[in-house]
């Protein structure tokens, strides 16, 4: 399929973000001109203000707001740090450059702004996301972790120096890293009709080797554990812009379940952001019931696993019957297993038998 | 012999005994002491020394010298007053020790300030407890009274080890200087090094009065001595004349309770009756507590002076407790706490113990003072033992409750311990207040530093975002140094004026950076084109600072500073900060 309409989700927010940042700077300057200490308002990210929205199928922030004032000694330092961060990402956007969280942390020192550690600077970036109401990827700030994509999808770069250049995502057998350039690329052409997401590198490699992308017309994505935000954003684009269903395969344990859930419904940490979730994506396995049905080699659930399952059972994101049922089975059989467990029946068993059965079951 | 148990201790004790006699002699003469101590090696011998101690004290009349220095005198004296040593006894011990170890006589030179100076060379006849006069010389004192010498020089030869004794000797002299800030002390050690402790005050504490013993504190031996020497022939008069705070009424009541007839002649009391009488005295609850005018405490001013002089702390608090008594012996506890400055921070609290103006430098850990210091929860005062602070405890009494013969350890006497504990608590509270105030000032200064640090950055990066020139942050906050190393004079001088019309809160921070001299400062504000005093004259001692917040709107604010004492210049730094809204 060739994609005609350029739904330019990737680039349009950036000009909005840039404008919002400039307005923020102007507001502060005018306040100082009037002899008033600058303040900034944002939605509170405290736990009491985080709610699950059935409408958006993700966590969102409530109405409660916090004001950060430069008149307040305790706020002054983070205030200055945030103004600098705004200035820095504005420069990034202006010069069409990208940066990473770590890079932002180090860059501050050149401007005589100091962060205790990277987590302090990460927090300030989250503040700025909350104020501007756009994810940091729109500021051109990306995390370190990289995941990969493989499949028949031709993209066209929009980053400086590569504008107009095209590439097919099946051109490299190790997959293509999902970085800033790819996140912002335009989708041009594809023969695929679905997205398969796996959390494990070994499985991803197996899927590429076994030509899953051909056999199932799929774009394969490897998340390397919990999916980075740029990857979640990329999955959402594939789902929204191309209308592809998304199937997620992860380990059969509470942690694997949650990797799938964060792709579907987002995390509480990102409650201030939209556009990172893919509510229609499906957790395709490995389910607790698969451990029984496929007689998979398993391990005993640890105490921490059980504790985590109890938490998930009460988590509003897990309200759906299917999730609750899987949690019940986990608790009953007290067992867990990994994606690799299928190798017990031969290296290709998972691709030859499990995958087609599951996809069919899910109506793909 | 107690105090002469090893070569190091012998040197220490000899110096100590002779120095204490000298200090007592100066106290008697009411003259600020000048003590000169010289310890030198005898020839090429490794372990024999000559110790010479000279003072400007009362001197000893010529015919008393042989008895005072050449005999262990158990006097018939029973009246009491506070003194450092038992005059003669400790000194004589040092002389005897010297004689035993070197077989050399003591040389004593003394004058009471009259026309003669007498010089003796003496040995002690140990078996007969009698002085042997080897030599006696008479020198003339100058005719003019003002030029006459008065005082005593004692020179002994002794064996010992100065190398080992040195740390304790120096510590002893430093601490002696601490509780005798009115004394000049010079010490020349065997290596020819000079140690000089200069007086910082001329004033001496009031001298102690001699008093009768209190009935509670009398033992059989003392009572027998009094009875032998009394001229009274009935018990009623005897009780009144020889005992502290016993009047006719109390004497009558006591004798009635003790079952002794009022007109009994004291000389007729049988030994068992005397023993019984002592017991009855201790049991009787009608005696008045002893008065403290037989004591000569340092007083808070002198103690502060001494601590400042020898420890050079940043802060000192002193407290003299009310006189009290244990077993009929009056006592007064004085306590000081010194913090910061040159007080070193060690792993443990620095504790200085004194009894009757004598430093106690040996056998520390067994002392009740340590027990008390350990029992205190220092965290309540925001202190930890590794902070730079020292505690100074001075107990004075007609009878110091020593634990041992060596006179180095205070015993745990309930009444005394209680006073020490309460004294420490009082000064510790003062230190805690000082520290919290200091912390508050520091915090405030730091808070304001945050404004000057971050506001310019907020302005700069906001301007960068907006693409315009940075806004002027002085509308929000401004800091100005209005006095910079200003040297005060006798009259008030204005600082630079701080334009405060747009600020709702103004902070004033003034420091006196001078090492010694205090300053007087005040703060004025311009209201309706008139300068009004906002903070009235305040004293700023050396090294201290004040920090005040002014609320309300003033057109302008300024500081004025002058020397507190006209001829003593101080050094002032001052800042004014303004904050809008």
Image (tube, grey):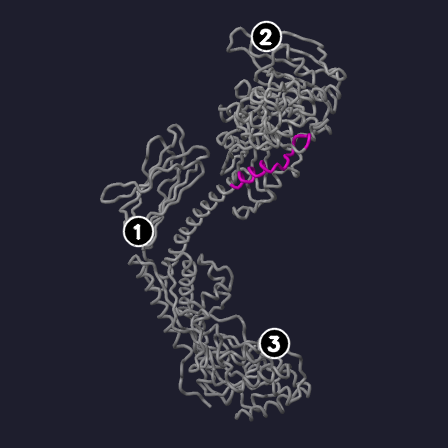
Taking A20 as reference, is A108 above or below it? above
Q: Residues within 10 Å of mark 3 (few under 14, many from 20)?
A: some
Is B412 one of the magenta-colored residues?
A: yes
Q: Is residue B407 left or right of residue B418?
A: right
Taking B18 as reference, is A193 above or below it? below
What is the spatial separation of the Cα atoms under label 1 and label 3, in whole angstroms?
Answer: 59 Å
Q: How many marks?
A: 3
* Residue in the foreground of this view, choosing between A196 and B173: B173
Mark on residue B116?
Answer: 2
Disc 1: which residue: B503
Q: Residues within 10 Å of mark 1 (few under 14, many from 20)?
A: many
Q: Mark 3 falls on what kind of element? A: helix
- Outermost residue, left direction? B528
What is the spatial separation of the Cα atoms under label 3 and label 2, in whole angstroms?
Answer: 103 Å
Residue B515: give x, y in percent of width and height: 46, 34
* Residue in the foreground of this view, choosing between B5 and B557: B5
- Residues drawn in magenta: B404-425
Residue A233: give x, y in percent of width and height: 47, 78
Q: In the rendered image, is residue A148 in sight? A: no
Of the image marks 1 and 2, the number of the one nearer the N terminus? 2
Which residue does the image show at 39% across and 27% down from the upper left? B567
Q: Disc 2 sits on a residue from what chain?
A: B
């Amino acid at each position: 399929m060739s994609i005609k309409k350029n739904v330019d989700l990737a680039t349009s927010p950036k000009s909005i973000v840039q404008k919002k940042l400039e307005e923020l700077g102007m507001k502060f300057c005018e306040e100082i001109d009037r002899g008033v200490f600058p303040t900034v308002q944002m939605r509170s990210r405290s736990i009491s203000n985080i709610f699950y929205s059935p409408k958006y199928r993700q966590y969102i922030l409530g109405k409660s707001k916090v004001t950060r004032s430069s008149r307040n000694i305790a706020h002054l330092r983070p205030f200055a740090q945030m103004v600098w961060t705004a200035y820095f990402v504005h420069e990034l956007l202006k010069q069409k450059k990208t940066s990473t969280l770590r890079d932002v942390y180090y860059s501050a020192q050149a401007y005589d702004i100091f962060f205790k550690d990277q987590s302090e600077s990460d927090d300030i970036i989250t503040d700025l996301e909350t104020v501007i109401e756009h994810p940091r990827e729109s500021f051109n700030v990306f995390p370190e972790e990289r995941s990969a994509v493989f499949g028949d999808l031709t993209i066209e770069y929009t980053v400086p120096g590569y504008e107009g250049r095209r590439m097919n995502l099946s051109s490299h057998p190790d997959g293509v890293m999902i970085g800033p350039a790819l996140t912002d690329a335009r989708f041009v052409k594809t023969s695929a009709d679905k997205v398969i997401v796996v959390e494990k590198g070994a499985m991803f490699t197996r899927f590429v080797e076994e030509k899953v992308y051909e056999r199932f017309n799929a774009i394969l994505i490897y998340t390397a554990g919990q999916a980075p935000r740029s990857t979640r954003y990329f999955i959402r684009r594939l789902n929204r812009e191309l209308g592809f269903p998304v199937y997620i395969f992860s380990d059969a344990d509470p942690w694997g379940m949650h990797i799938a859930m964060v792709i579907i419904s987002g995390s509480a940490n990102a409650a201030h952001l939209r556009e990172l979730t893919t509510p229609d994506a499906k957790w395709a396995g490995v389910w607790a019931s698969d451990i029984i049905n496929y007689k998979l080699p398993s391990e005993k659930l640890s105490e921490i696993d059980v504790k985590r399952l109890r938490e998930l059972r009460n988590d509003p994101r897990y309200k759906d019957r299917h999730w609750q049922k899987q949690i019940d089975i986990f608790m009953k059989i007290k067992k867990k297993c990994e994606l690799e467990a299928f190798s017990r029946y031969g290296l290709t068993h998972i691709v030859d038998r499990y995958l087609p059965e599951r996809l069919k079951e899910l109506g793909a | 012999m107690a105090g002469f148990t090893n070569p190091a201790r012998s040197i220490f004790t000899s110096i100590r005994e002779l120095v204490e006699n000298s200090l007592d002699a100066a106290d008697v003469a009411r003259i600020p002491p000048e003590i000169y101590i010289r310890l030198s090696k005898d020839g090429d011998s490794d372990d024999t020394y000559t110790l010479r101690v000279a003072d400007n004290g009362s001197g000893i009349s010529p015919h008393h010298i042989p008895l005072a220095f050449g005999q262990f005198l158990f006097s018939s004296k029973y009246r009491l007053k506070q003194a450092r040593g038992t005059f003669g006894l400790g000194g004589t011990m040092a002389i005897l020790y010297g004689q035993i170890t070197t077989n050399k006589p003591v040389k004593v030179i003394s004058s009471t300030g009259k026309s003669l100076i007498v010089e003796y060379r003496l040995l002690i006849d140990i078996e007969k407890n009698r002085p042997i006069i080897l030599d006696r010389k008479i020198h003339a004192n100058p005719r003019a009274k003002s030029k006459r010498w008065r005082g005593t020089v004692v020179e002994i030869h002794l064996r010992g080890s100065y190398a080992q004794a040195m740390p304790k000797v120096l510590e002893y002299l430093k601490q002696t200087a601490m509780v005798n800030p009115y004394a000049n002390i010079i010490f020349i050690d065997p290596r020819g090094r000079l140690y000089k402790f200069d007086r910082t005050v001329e004033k001496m504490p009031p001298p102690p009065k001699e008093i009768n013993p209190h009935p509670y504190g009398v033992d059989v031996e003392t009572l027998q001595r009094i009875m032998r020497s009394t001229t009274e022939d009935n018990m009623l008069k005897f009780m009144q004349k020889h005992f502290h705070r016993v009047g006719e009424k109390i004497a009558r009541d006591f004798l009635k309770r003790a079952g002794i007839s009022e007109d009994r002649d004291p000389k007729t009391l049988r030994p068992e009756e005397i023993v019984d009488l002592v017991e009855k005295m201790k049991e009787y609850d009608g005696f008045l507590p002893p008065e403290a005018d037989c004591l000569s405490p340092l007083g808070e001013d002198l103690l502060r002076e001494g601590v400042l002089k020898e420890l050079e702390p940043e802060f000192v608090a002193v407290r003299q407790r009310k006189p009290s008594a244990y077993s009929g012996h009056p006592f007064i506890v004085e306590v000081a706490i010194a913090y910061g400055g040159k007080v070193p921070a060690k792993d443990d609290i620095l504790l200085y113990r004194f009894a009757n103006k004598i430093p106690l430098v040996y056998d520390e850990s067994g002392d009740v003072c340590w027990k008390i210091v350990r029992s205190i929860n220092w965290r309540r005062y925001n202190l930890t033992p590794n902070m730079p602070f020292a505690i100074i405890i001075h107990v004075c009494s007609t009878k110091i409750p020593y634990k041992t013969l060596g006179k180095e350890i205070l015993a745990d006497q309930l009444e005394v311990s209680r006073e020490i504990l309460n004294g420490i608590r009082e000064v510790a509270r003062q230190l805690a207040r000082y520290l919290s105030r200091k912390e508050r000032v520091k915090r405030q200064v730091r808070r304001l530093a945050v404004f000057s640090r971050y506001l310019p950055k907020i302005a700069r990066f906001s301007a960068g975002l907006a693409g315009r020139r940075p806004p002027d942050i002085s509308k929000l906050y401004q800091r100005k140094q209005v006095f910079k190393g200003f040297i005060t004079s006798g009259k008030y001088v204005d600082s630079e004026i701080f334009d405060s019309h747009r600020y709702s809160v103004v902070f004033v921070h003034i420091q006196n950076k001078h090492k010694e001299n205090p300053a007087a400062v005040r703060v004025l504000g311009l209201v309706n084109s008139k300068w009004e005093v906002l903070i009235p004259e305040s004293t700023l001692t050396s090294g201290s600072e004040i920090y005040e917040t002014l609320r309300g709107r003033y057109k302008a604010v300024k500081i004025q500073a002058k020397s507190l004492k006209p001829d003593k210049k101080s050094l002032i730094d001052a800042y004014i900060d303004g904050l809008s809204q």
